[in-house]
């Protein structure tokens, strides 16, 4: 990849990770990017770095523009190592550079990761750094999605370096939203939000008005393409994602051993269809939990089923419930179902997992021994169709 000049003297110098397929346990089928940005002015600033394995590629890209030794400031918007991993390699070249990071979490986090041998400049809300013709303003965004997160705004160029906000795990040789398939990008933006930012919807709702108060012509995130033609679309999407009001749709998630629980899942699906509720069916043997969570994000109903094995639910279902609890989706209606041979504990355990997610349980756990009859399945569909 070549460097891209975003504005006179401002460059994208990050890297594309074409082959990564997992990030924090969620699938990245379209790869990822680790974006970094270089500003050439009276003082030279590098905004964020990249994952450590790509450090030399980052430095080579910087050398196309300027000797890395001339960097005056390294702006660390986020301590996490896909953003900060190349800090040691950069600082080994830019030996007089000052690391600018949020106070106190960024400062403390970077010291714990990389030691205290560097010169740090902790910043807080409202602090401004002058580079000459350009200034950088710092806006803390704590818990989006770590305590240290912040975004950096350049008012002269109307660029928001938005860090993890508005990002997508999406690899492309193109850099801007209007150069790629918007359906793909928006799908990846939603998946990114669902699997990384969903637990922090309250913080996002507080942050969006601050961002809307800035005059922005370009959003430059840390992952994926930059937003220049669809800024309103992605901001409105984030408003929708962070709104606790669900859409009128259902998600049915299950695993099955000998198809009995699968038959129940399909009966539940049929019940929602009879009710006129858009519904999706996910089989945990073939569907990844991170793809499922993209639909759970705005679903009104989340229904989960498992057969009983060794007095427990299937491990795939337990994993899904654990993952979902951590992401803390809000305002869901739910119930559990499952088949069994003799013990019959799984439906109750799944119900406990749904309660632990603080979902509203709208039906007692439904279970059947061995193979459900057609009459049983018909009754189950009708019960689902009758839900409020």
Image: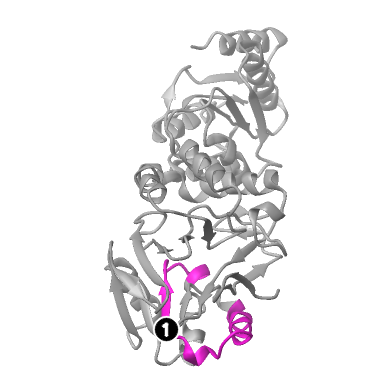
Query: Image quarter for residue 284?
Result: top right
Label 1 CA crowd tier, 10 Å (few <14, some 14–19, many 20+) = some
Q: Position of residue 118 (x, y in %)?
A: 35, 86
Depth order, front residue of 254/181 = 181
As for residue 287 lying within the magenta part, the answer is: no
Q: Position of residue 340 (x, y in %)?
A: 61, 26
Residue placed under numbered mark 1 in the picture: 43
As for residue 79 lying within the magenta part, the answer is: yes
Depth order, front residue of 281/41 = 41
**Is residue 386 rendered to the left or right of residue 77?**
right
Query: Image quarter for residue 79?
Result: bottom left
Q: Which secondary structure lies at badge 1? A: loop
**In the rendered view, how is the structure colored?**
one colour
Range of the magenta residues? 54-83
Q: Position of residue 300 (x, y in %)?
A: 51, 25
Residue 314 seen in the figure: no
- Image quadrant containing the N terminus: bottom right
């Amino acid at each position: 990849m070549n460097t891209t000049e975003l504005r006179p003297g401002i460059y994208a110098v990050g890297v594309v990770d074409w082959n990564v397929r997992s990030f924090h346990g969620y699938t990245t089928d379209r790869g990822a990017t680790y974006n970094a940005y270089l500003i050439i002015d009276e003082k030279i600033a590098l905004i964020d770095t990249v994952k450590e394995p790509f450090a030399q590629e980052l430095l080579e890209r910087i050398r196309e523009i300027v000797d890395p030794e001339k960097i005056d400031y390294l702006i660390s918007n986020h301590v996490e190592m896909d953003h900060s991993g190349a800090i040691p390699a950069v600082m080994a070249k830019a030996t007089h550079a000052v690391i600018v990071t949020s106070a106190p979490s960024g400062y403390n986090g970077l010291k714990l990761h990389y030691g205290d041998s560097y010169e740090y400049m902790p910043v807080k809300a409202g602090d401004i750094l002058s580079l000459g013709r350009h200034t950088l303003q710092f806006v803390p965004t704590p818990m989006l999605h770590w305590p240290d997160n912040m975004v950096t705004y350049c008012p002269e160029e109307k660029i928001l370096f938005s860090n993890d906000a508005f990002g997508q795990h999406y690899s492309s040789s193109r850099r801007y939203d209007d150069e790629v398939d918007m359906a793909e990008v928006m799908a990846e933006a939603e998946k990114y939000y669902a699997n990384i930012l969903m637990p922090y919807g309250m913080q996002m709702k507080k942050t969006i008005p601050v961002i809307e108060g800035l005059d922005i012509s370009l959003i430059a995130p840390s992952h994926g393409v930059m937003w220049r033609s669809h800024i309103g679309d992605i901001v409105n999407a984030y408003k929708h994602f962070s709104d606790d009001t669900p859409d009128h749709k259902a998600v049915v998630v299950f695993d099955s051993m000998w198809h009995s629980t699968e038959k129940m899942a399909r009966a539940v699906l049929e019940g929602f269809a009879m009710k006129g509720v858009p519904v999706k069916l996910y089989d945990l043997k073939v569907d990844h939990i991170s793809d499922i969570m993209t639909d759970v994000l705005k679903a009104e109903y989340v229904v989960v089923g498992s057969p009983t094995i060794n007095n427990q639910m299937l491990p795939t279902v337990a994993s899904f419930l654990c993952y979902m609890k951590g992401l803390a989706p809000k305002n869901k209606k739910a119930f559990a179902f499952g088949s069994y041979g003799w013990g019959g504990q799984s439906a109750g355990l799944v119900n406990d997992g749904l309660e632990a997610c603080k979902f509203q349980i709208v039906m007692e756990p439904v279970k059947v021994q061995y193979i459900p009859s057609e009459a049983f399945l018909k009754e189950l569909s009708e019960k689902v169709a009758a839900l409020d």
